[in-house]
Amino acid sequence: MTTPQHSAVRARTSPAAGAPAIEFVGVNKNYLSHGETVPAVKRTDLAIAQGEFFSLLGPSGCGKTTTMRMIAGFEEPTAGKVYLDGEDVTGVSANKRDVNMVFQSYALFPHLNTHQNVAFGLERKKVAKSEINRRVGEILEIVSLTGMEKRSPKEMSGGQQQRVALARALVNRPRALLLDEPLGALDLKLRQQMQIELKRIQREVGITFVYVTHDQGEALTMSDRIAVMNAGVIEQLGSPRQIYERPASRFVAGFIGTSNIVEGHVDRVEGGLALLSYTTQDRVVVPAGSPVRQGDKLEVSIRPEKIDLHRGVPPVQSTGGSVLSGTVTEVVYHGTSTNYTVATAAGADFTVFDQNASNADDLADRGDRVYLTWAPQHSYLIGD
Amino acid sequence: MNRVKRQIAPYLLVLPGGIWLLIFFAVPMVAMLSLSLQEGDIVHGYQFTGHWQTYTEAISAYQTQIYRSLIYGAITTIVLIAMAFPIAFWIAFYGGRRKSTYLFLVLLPFFVSFVLRTISWRQILTDEGPLLSPLRDAGLIGQSFHILGTPFAVIGGLVYNFLPFMVLPIYVALERIDPRVVEAARDLYANPITTFRRVIFPLALPGVFAGVLMTFVPASSDFVNSEVLGSSDTTMIGQVIQAQFLDNSDYPTASALSFVLMLVLLIGVFTYARILGTEDVMKVAAR
């Protein structure tokens, strides 16, 4: 369907090769609300590399949309500077910035048809008519909308409108494409389809994508790097794997996937492992990268799929790993796995995902006394 | 049984309005049409004779007033668009949380009777009034300068009286524009002027269209503004009809003129809608 010669859509090589596609230096953004200054984005430094698929992830009101709107030029930082390809664009209005946006509600021009919508930016740039027609045709092919040129937005489905919005932005070969929760309005099936589609298009055109979402699954599957934001601050910036496996804060651990978080005081430090004891047999072992001392209060996060659940049989003590006893309070069967909620001796409720690999006869029931064990490397010291 | 009920329900809903229209619109229309074809006088009564010559006589006698009314109506409408668009635009995009307050202010004069409002303009614009006498004392205008009695005063009165009917539909159209669509235009390299020309204005055209319909027709057939603010040189067809009915009791001529006016306005409005129907307006603007 898509032909290989997308030279026309590929991002031009940047004038300042080596400079990040987008850079924030000491950016602050405050809003004035009812006479009070409300910080939306607090002192942020950020560098997004050329051709990267970069996600801004966080709950609503975390400042991710404001951050994106500062890149687009719809908002100006209260303090700090914004650079595009190494060029200072702080104070440059949106129509003079070489980035394009895909809006959450698509924001297509309702009085224009598909072709006119997509051609809008090129017409403003005074591109020759024949060139416009060629490029619009080409981009519509990439987003699989060939033949829809004369349709008006209201004659198209949500998914099709989404593609028009994408084409309308991409056809200008921007230095970066900004996507504001672009799949939010689509149903699950279409959403998953569009996620794959977006990744493919990004690979084909090689443009930097900045993707704003509150959906952690979407961010994890699509991104090269993710910035997790909360209350106007980037809590963690890293690859999906780093963010999932090594959450930098309790917020990140809780926001990305499911985490069990347990608190405790250090009893003993032995060979880089800190030991937190609750009873004589209930203990959590965590690798301590930074020096911890006896009596320190620690927060440890454990992913539910890393935990083994033993029904009634006290596990062998010699593994050197963590052991917590508890009572099953909830069992939810999910087909491929069973999710347990266990009230543990450490005081925290634990979620455990148990793969239904063997015969499901040995399922624990509500009220059963169980033991949870996991290897030391699966405990992660938050903020380490 | 239930299905029958469900099927007739819409017709039942239309019934009150339908009966109203029948009694107060259709019946008088037929009565007036018949009246315009009758002959006689108020003392001896009127007889239906099918005397259609009343029409040609009325048209040739009052064509100046008919033309004048249409021209005044057209000028009023154009001035209204020019004045109402900025007002509606400002309220829709810069009104913030006070939008309803500003709309209320636009409507506020309407809490005073139409005639009273127009008469108060007469007080303001009169030669000895608060506007002209200081200007004349200051030597800025000559002794022979008048506003009252000129077409300027009449059109000014019409514009004043119909302003909300233009502001409101344009406001509604502008208010419905998704701010993201405006941002999208900016994002796609359109400067503020281009954004207005290519996106905001085309999307507001249905409102302008509705506003024109709501002002051109009543402005063209108005009989108060010229009566109060004008002179014999500004007589509009509405005044003529009123005078024929109430002063001269020449019912056939008055009815005939009413029908002529109605026909002219209908043709005008339909031509306008034909050329600039909402959909087509969009297409023209999109080019």
Image (spheres, rainbow, N blue to C red):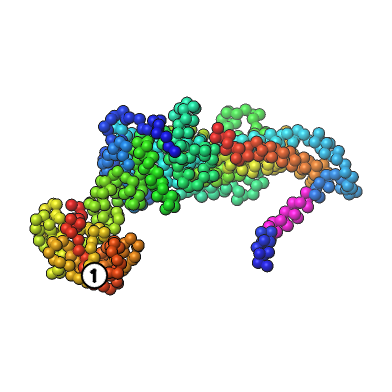
Q: Residue at x 65, y 39 (%)?
A: B273
Residue under label 1, please give it: A311
From the top left corner, tell me how far across and down residue A312 is, in percent: 22, 72
From the top left corner, tell me how far across and down residue A330 is, in percent: 31, 68
| Residue A56 is one of the magenta-drawn residues | no
| Residue B18 is one of the magenta-drawn residues | yes
Nearer to the camera, A14 or A40: A14
Q: Amino acid at mark 1?
A: Arg
Q: Residue at x 37, y 33 (%)?
A: A10
Is residue B71 positioned above or below A241 on the image?
Answer: above
Nearer to the camera, A281 or B176: A281
Determine which quarter of the picture holds residue B278: top right
Nearer to the camera, A126 or A215: A215
Q: Is residue A28 left or right of residue A294?
A: right
From the top left corner, tell me how far across and down residue A287 is, in percent: 15, 55
Give the magenta range.
Answer: B12-29
Quadrant housing the N terminus of chain A: top left
From the top left corner, tell me how far across and down residue B163 is, in percent: 60, 42
Is residue A54 positioned above or below B60 on the image?
Answer: below
**In the image, farthest residue toward the bottom:** A367
Q: Is residue B263 left or right of residue A298?
A: right
Disc 1 secondary structure class: strand
Q: Residue at x 22, y 67 (%)?
A: A310
Q: Is residue B104 left or right of residue A364?
A: right
